Image (spheres, rainbow, N blue to C red):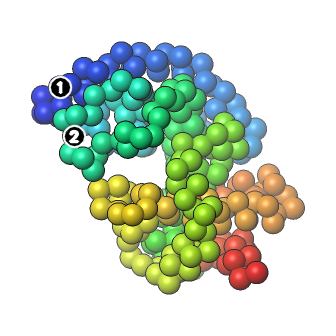
C-alpha cells in the first residue's frame, strides 16, 4: 500500500498499539445491549477493525461499522515525524489514552449512524449545514449516554467557552449547502479546533432531550431526525441562547 510506504515509521510505531483492539472486543456487546435498551429498533452491524490510510477513525458502510485501527490506537510513542506539521498532534498535549474506551465511544457513535435516516422528510427544508451537524452531534450525544465518555473533549471545551458566539456564527449560515466550515475541516481550520459542528449539533440535541418529558421518545426522535429545522425549533436551543 502506498500510504504504508510513505509513512513507514508511523505504521511501524503504531503496530504494537493496534493489538489493544482485542481488549475492546467484549465492549462491543456492551454497546449493542445499551443501545437496544435506549432504542428498541436498534439493529446491530458487524464491527470491522481495519488498518487504513490514516483518514478516519470510524465510518460505516451498508454492512459494517468500520474502525480505522491505525488512528484509534495511537499511543504515547507513535512516530508522527513523517507527517507535515499541521497533521501532527500538539506535542504539548498528552496523548496517553484509554484505547479500549476510545474505541468503545467510536463504535457507539458509528452505530448511531447506522440507525439514522438517510433521507429528509418530503416536507423538510433542505438545510445541509444544520442537518450534517445534527447527524454528527446527535451521534456524539447518544454515544455519551451509552459509554459515559466522549472523544471530543477538546471540541467541547472550546465550545463551552465560546458557545454563544459560535451559535450566532453558525446560525448566520444555517442552511449553507455544505458544512465545510464546521466539519471535516482538520486540514483547513485555523485558530480553533476542527469539527465544531459536532458541538453545535450535540448542544441542540441535548436541549431537545432535556426539554422532552418522554426520554424514550426523545431518543427515537433524535436518531430518526429527518426535518432539521423542525427539530431545531422543538429543541428550543435558539431561544435558550437569547436568555
Residue 117, visible in the rendered structure: no
Instruction: Pick the residue in front: 218 or 130.
Output: 130
What residue lies at 70% left-to-right and 73% top-to-bottom? Answer: 237
Percent across and percent down for residue 57 are 40, 39
Classed neighbour count for the residue bearing mark 2: other residues with Cα under 10 Å, few (<14), some (14–19), many (≥20): few
Q: Nearer the viewer, mark 2 or mark 1?
A: 2
Instruction: Pick the residue in front: 53 or 225.
Output: 53
For mark 1, give the secondary structure.
helix
Percent across and percent down for residue 138 are 60, 56
Classed neighbour count for the residue bearing mark 1: other residues with Cα under 10 Å, few (<14), some (14–19), many (≥20): few
Percent across and percent down for residue 109 are 55, 44
For mark 2, give the secondary structure.
loop
Whether residue 1 is situated above or below residue 90 in the rendered picture: above
Q: Quadrant of the N terminus?
A: top left
Q: Which mark is residue 83?
A: 2
What residue lies at 35% left-to-right and 55% top-to-bottom? Answer: 186
Residue that numbered label 1 is attached to: 8
Q: Which mark is residue 42?
A: none
Instruction: Pick the residue in front: 42 or 23.
Output: 23
Image quadrant where residue 37 sits:
top right
Q: Is residue 67 left or right of residue 241?
A: left
Whether residue 113 is situated above or below residue 58 in the rendered picture: below
Q: Quadrant of the C terminus?
A: bottom right
In three-dimensional space, the C-alpha distance between marks 2 and 1, rounded to whole angstroms, equals 11 Å
What residue lies at 21% left-to-right and 40% top-to-bottom? Answer: 83
Residues under numbered marks 2 and 1 in contact, where contact means CB atoms less than 8 Å apart: no
Percent across and percent down for residue 103 are 51, 31
Residue with the most extreme front position: 92
Whether residue 221 is situated above or below residue 11 in the rendered picture: below
Amino acid at each position: 500500500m502506498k500510504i504504508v510506504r510513505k509513512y513507514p515509521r508511523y505504521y511501524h510505531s503504531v503496530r504494537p498499539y493496534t493489538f489493544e483492539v482485542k481488549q475492546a472486543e467484549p465492549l462491543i456487546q456492551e454497546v449493542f445491549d445499551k443501545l437496544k435498551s435506549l432504542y428498541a429498533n436498534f439493529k446491530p452491524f458487524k464491527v470491522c477493525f481495519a488498518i487504513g490510510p490514516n483518514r478516519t477513525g470510524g465510518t460505516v458502510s451498508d454492512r459494517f461499522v468500520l474502525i480505522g485501527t491505525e488512528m484509534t490506537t495511537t499511543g504515547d510513542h507513535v512516530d508522527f515525524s513523517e507527517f507535515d506539521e499541521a497533521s501532527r498532534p500538539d506535542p504539548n498535549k498528552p496523548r496517553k489514552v484509554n484505547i479500549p474506551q476510545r474505541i468503545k465511544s467510536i463504535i457507539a457513535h458509528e452505530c448511531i449512524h447506522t440507525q439514522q435516516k438517510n433521507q429528509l422528510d418530503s416536507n423538510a427544508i433542505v438545510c445541509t449545514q444544520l442537518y450534517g451537524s445534527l447527524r454528527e452531534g446527535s451521534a456524539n450525544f447518544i454515544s455519551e449516554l451509552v459509554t459515559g465518555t466522549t472523544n471530543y473533549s477538546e471540541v467541547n471545551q472550546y465550545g463551552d467557552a465560546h458557545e454563544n458566539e459560535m451559535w450566532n456564527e453558525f446560525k448566520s449560515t444555517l442552511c449553507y449547502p455544505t458544512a465545510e466550515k464546521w466539519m471535516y475541516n482538520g486540514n483547513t481550520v485555523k485558530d480553533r479546533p476542527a469539527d465544531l459542528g459536532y458541538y453545535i449539533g450535540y448542544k441542540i440535541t441535548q436541549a431537545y432531550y432535556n426539554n422532552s418529558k418522554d426520554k424514550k421518545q426523545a431518543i427515537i426522535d433524535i436518531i430518526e431526525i429527518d426535518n432539521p429545522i423542525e427539530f431545531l425549533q422543538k429543541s428550543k436551543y435558539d431561544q435558550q441562547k437569547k436568555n
